[in-house]
């Protein structure tokens, strides 16, 4: 078989796989009244919503309707960049306000920039054009208020619930109002599935 035919077949299959995926967001309450937003990328929404609903029900939660908890989170783009010699943090913050950045923090060796969800491209362009080293760039749902849980509450149903969501191959991210930040990334996701980032 000619090489061109093989390449054409591979490209067609790859394009079909990518185009079949849809991003779907599910919202609900988990154990202890924790608000949870689950972001997925799936080629089968019917199967995915059934899986998500079963996890909510099994562990003492309830799946709500789309948009019911959106007001409890800010959807932000978050950049982690290296400090740049000769650039003061205050000057950088003032400069980036015009590009949609609304908060700047320093975390160990990184500078963390929080910006409006829609400002991602503008912020990225500015950083690249001005020679900043970008360590990571992603989207996060940041809760307005958080709920502190004790050790007993963090175990049991909530622990099992988070484990199940991490195992979902269609899960991209889930954000909660639980005051604890742990991030898990699959470096080698299964074929056809997106990398799963979990914040809980």
Image (cartoon, grey):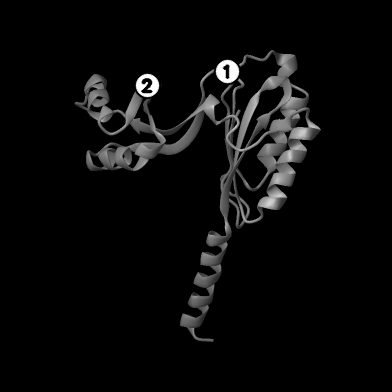
| 56 sits to left or right of 11 | right
Dot 2 or dot 1: first in sequence order is: 2
Disc number at residue 44?
Answer: none
Please, which residue is most extreme toward the bottom here?
1
Q: What element carries label 1?
A: loop
Q: Mark 2 points at which residue?
A: 105
- The location of residue 72, given as percent across then percent down, is 54, 25
17 vs 61, nearest the viewer: 61
| 84 sits to left or right of 11 | left
Q: Nearer the viewer, mark 2 or mark 1?
A: 1
- The location of residue 73, given as percent across then percent down, is 52, 27
- The location of residue 62, given as percent across then percent down, is 73, 31
How many C-alpha atoms fall within 10 Å of the one at disc 2: few (<14), some, or many (≥20)?
few
Residue at the spot x=59%, y=23% of the render? Answer: 177
Image quarter (top left, top right, bottom left or bottom right) of the C terminus: top right
Q: Can residue 6 be seen in this view?
A: yes
Image quarter (top left, top right, bottom left or bottom right) of the N terminus: bottom right
70 vs 88, nearest the viewer: 70
Q: Quadrant of residue 31?
A: top right
| 162 is higher (above) or lower (below) than 152 | below
- The location of residue 86, given as percent across then percent down, is 19, 26
Q: Name the residue under label 1.
A: 146
| 8 is higher (above) or lower (below) than 162 | below
Q: What element carries label 2?
A: strand
How many C-alpha atoms fall within 10 Å of the one at disc 1: few (<14), some, or many (≥20)?
some
| 76 sits to left or right of 175 | left
């Amino acid at each position: 078989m000619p090489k061109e035919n093989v390449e054409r077949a591979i490209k067609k299959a790859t394009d079909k796989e990518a185009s079949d995926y849809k991003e779907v967001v599910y919202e609900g309450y988990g154990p202890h009244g924790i608000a949870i937003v689950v972001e997925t990328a799936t080629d089968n929404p019917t199967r995915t919503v059934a899986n998500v609903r079963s996890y909510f029900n099994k562990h003492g939660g309830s799946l709500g309707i789309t948009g019911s908890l959106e007001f409890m989170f800010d959807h932000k783009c978050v950049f982690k960049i290296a400090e740049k010699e000769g650039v003061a943090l205050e000057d950088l913050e003032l400069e980036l306000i015009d590009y949609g950045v609304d908060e700047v923090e320093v975390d160990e060796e990184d500078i963390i920039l929080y910006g409006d969800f829609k400002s991602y491209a503008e912020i990225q362009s500015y950083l690249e054009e001005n020679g900043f080293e970008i360590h990571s760039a992603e989207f996060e749902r940041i809760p307005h208020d958080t709920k502190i849980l004790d050790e007993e509450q963090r175990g049991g149903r909530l622990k099992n619930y988070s484990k199940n969501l991490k195992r979902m191959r269609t899960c991209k991210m889930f954000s909660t109002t639980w005051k604890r930040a742990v991030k898990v990334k699959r470096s080698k996701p299964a074929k056809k599935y997106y990398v799963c980032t979990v914040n809980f």
